[in-house]
Amino acid sequence: MNNIPNVKLGLIAVSRDCFVITLSQKRRSAVAAAIAADGYEIYEVKTTVENEKDMQAAVREAEQAGCNALVVFLGNFGPETPETLIAACFKGPVMYAAAAEETGNDLINGRGDAYCGMLNCSYNLGLRKLKAVIPEYPVGTATEIARMVTDFIPVARALIGLASLKIITFGPRPQDFFACNAPIKPLYDLGIEIQENSELDLLTAYRCHESDSRIKSVVEEMEQELGISGNQYPDILPKLAQFELTLLDWAEQNKGSRNYVVFANKCWPAFPQEFGFEPCYVNSRLAAKGIPVACEVDIYGALSEYIGTCVTGEPVTLLDINNSVPQDMYDKDIHGKFPYTLHDTFMGFHCGNTPFCHLKAGAVKYQLIQNRLLENGGTPDFTRGTLEGDIVPGKITFFRLHGNADTTLQAYIAEGEILPVATNSFGGIGIFAIPEMGRFYRHVLISKRYPHHGAVAFGAAGKALFTIFNYLGVQDISFNQPKGMLYKDENPFA
């Protein structure tokens, strides 16, 4: 994936000038060795920070080494002002962590008091209104600090990506999809750029690619990916390849000052009639390349997908929180086999934008709903182009970052799984199970006015996502609360 950042970490040790500096330096080297043992690279900044001039020198050294994220390590109590100014002067995300004492046999010259220093560090970060990542328990041995760094890497990757992201849109939201239209002011507050375009701009660009010499090679890629069983409409692949090249070229030509691009595009009802196909398969292929394309001009959906891509380093998808699981299907295929109630389950669906790698038997098909609406349910023509199949079972994280009407941000995160149960339906679809989903659906998704789209990361990504949303200043971060933990508006007598 070339649309997400590569994180290059730097490690800066700080030392209070009334403490033994070599203690902080020795502990820094141990942390660097533990990180290397875990298989990660980190640049060990040789300047140990005791004062502001040291701070400037250390940041400069890290930047010259190409670091785009920092770990500030309190090897002892640490100097409050210089250590927090690192976060002010360095242009990337910064994590703070502190050294635990190693042994009860050396608590005189070998005692660093970083447990205390971390409190003052946090206090000073707050005074300066500086953002920083602080782990859940930020004090540890070299091995424990290395694990904190491992957790920090996907967070840093997302924060670096967001700082240089442009969201490109084509077309207004479709009628009756008001939920996909949210104020973009909060995105500018996050430093994200938006480029809004007409569907006519896209159509003109598409036509300019009609004789593109690269179409043949993209078609060959598609044929190889789909195989014989998945390539059900081979005649439509050249059009889809032409459209894929149109979007990729538009992204490259319109990045401007930004390094990373995602799309939020209108895909119906006029799109298939004018372009001659549904764009879903192309959207899935771009998502697999790390360039999510959100359906129905869902700008916050595209943003959420991109965050998930950065966190996992893998393709994600955007799905409708779509339909309930029928009682008879639950009784036959789920009850007694999996630890979920009927209300813990639902079906996540979209027309065909989920990457091929996440489908059990993906195939290019046609959009049944649009075929009914636009082709009177007849032999499909321009409603072809979806990528359909049951989604591969496994752990997932369902989440969304969303802008409210008052331009505040809110988010939700819910971890669960896709069950290995056949859906017997159409589209890109899976049976999802999230503990206490019924209550979460009512008291978060409905009560807090979330739209029907949610991003899906394949794996357990909740820890990193929560850290990212908290760092971004999101005040309202919801999750699927366990039994006995009431939501604010939940009826205790229900």
Image: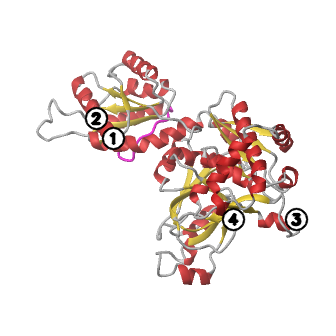
Spatial separation of the CA atoms under disc 4 and disc 1:
42 Å
- How packed mark 1 is, by other alpha carbons closer than 10 Å (few <14, some 14-19, many 20 or more), is many
Q: Secondary structure at mark 3?
A: loop
Q: Are marks 4 and 1 in contact (CB under 8 Å)?
A: no
**Residue that appears at 72% across and 31% down:** 253
Of label 3 and label 2, which has the lower sequence position? Answer: 2
Q: Are marks 2 and 4 in contact (CB under 8 Å)?
A: no
Residue on which the image places disc 1 = 146
Between marks 4 and 1 in the image, the one whose residue lies nearer the viewer: 4
Of label 1 and label 3, which has the lower sequence position? Answer: 1
Side (left or right) of 271 relative to 158 = right
Give the color scheme: rainbow, by chain, secondary structure or one colour: secondary structure
On the rendered image, what quadrant is the N terminus found in?
A: top right
Residue on which the image places disc 4 = 427
Q: Is residue 135 magenta?
A: yes
The residue nearer to you, when weighing 171 against 479, is 171
On the rendered image, what quadrant is the C terminus found in?
A: bottom right
Q: Secondary structure at mark 2?
A: helix
| Occupied quadrant, residue 379 | bottom right
Look at label 2 and name its amino acid. Ala
Q: Secondary structure at mark 1?
A: helix
Give the overall secondary structure of the magenta segment: loop
Residue on which the image places disc 3 = 375
